[in-house]
Image (cartoon, rainbow, N blue to C red):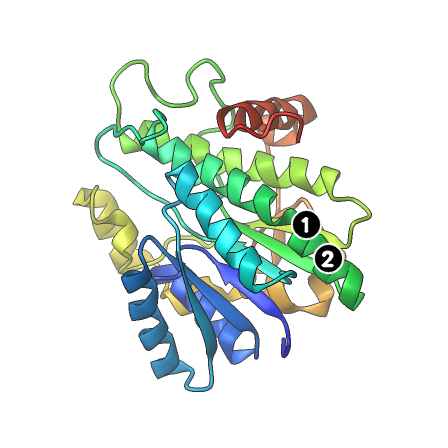
Amino acid sequence: MDGRVALVTGATGGLGRAVATALAREGATVVVVGRSSSRAEDAMRDIRAAAPAARLEPLACDLSVQASIRSAAREFLSRHDKLDVLVNAAGVFRKERHVTPDGLELTFATNVLGYFLLTNLLLDALKRAATDTSRTSRIVNIASRYSYGWSVTKLDFDDLQTAQGKYSFTRSTPPTMLGRVLFTQELAERLRGTGVVVNAVHPGLVKHTALLNDVGGPFRWMTNTFGRSAEKAADTAVWLATSPEAEAVSGKLWANRKELPTPGMGSDPDARRRLWDECARLSGLMGS
């Protein structure tokens, strides 16, 4: 990874920080994305403690706010004209419904639209890296094996932002994991022949992560009791981002370096195109 540039969202803790640390150990220059500059810089200190030779840069970005995403993309592109690896690892679980400054439900805005908008704004840099280096550029989206446990195999396109009925994280979050898989599949189709591949990863339960601080309760207890360490959970994401074996695969969902099935809407091209069009509308990227 020497000479390559990687950008990791959600890199201030948990799985994202573990991925950023692993990529830094591989020799990449890692752009550490956090909701604020201070959080990104704190994460950089932790990463350097584990990887003293790490080459790191901070980047502030609140993935729930579109103006922040656009500003972060501009800042990154002012420093770099190419991007070799993009790992979308940021995410939220919220006990109560919140609305962003853009008027969107926070979980959907962060977990799906944030991935969609940031990735699209950085696509040209990813394509340039593939063209200029003759090496595959990689996008890795942290998602979930959405059909197990949660029993979610379809999206309610009439209520993507959980505005109807009683709100809960068990209603709002699982569909966004399917949304990430659909986004990954549709993006893979659109990137055919560009030298950029994109895959989704189910990391499993990751213990002791701040991601679950808001929801707490039995789910957090189960995760902390039975989950894997962030370092172990990061293995497949790092493999997809770096390994020669993964440079030709795209549009798949993975766990433990093995491809997973995508049942329900996860096998429906119309669903992934419909979600893409809705994300493009909500993020102001119509025509993309």
* Residue depicted at x 51% and y 33%: 179
- The answer to whether the residues at label 2 and label 1 have Cβ atoms under 8 Å apart is yes
Image coordinates of residue 22 in percent, x first then y, are 49, 73
Residue pictured at 59% horizontal, 68% vertical? 5
Residue at the spot of label 2: 128
Mark 2 residue element: helix
When the figure is inspected, residue 199 is found, relative to residue 246, above or below; the finding is above
Tell whether 237 sits left or right of 211. right
Q: Amino acid at mark 2?
A: Arg
Q: Quadrant of residue 77?
A: bottom right
Residue in the picture at 45% in, 73% down:
56
Q: Quadrant of the N terminus?
A: bottom right
Q: Quadrant of residue 134?
A: bottom right
User: Where's residue 152, x and y in %?
Assistant: 46, 29
Q: Position of residue 249 (x, y in %)?
A: 73, 53
Q: Which one is nearer the viewer's eye here, 232 or 185? A: 185
Query: For the point 46% across and 13% down, which residue is it?
Result: 158
Which three-letter amino acid code belongs to the residue tagged 1?
Answer: Asp
User: Outermost residue toward the left?
Assistant: 217
Residue 124: numbered disc: 1
Element at label 1: helix
Task: Say few, some or many: other residues with alpha carbon within 10 Å of mark 2 (under 14 / 14 to 19 / 20 or more).
Answer: some
Task: Give the distance between the C-alpha atoms of the residues marked 2 and 1, in whole angstroms.
Answer: 6 Å
Determine whether 8 is above or below 191 in the image.
below
Horizontal side of 218 relative to 137 (left or right) equals: left
Residue 54 at least partly seen: yes
Please indicate whether residue 280 sits to the left or right of residue 65 in the image. Answer: right
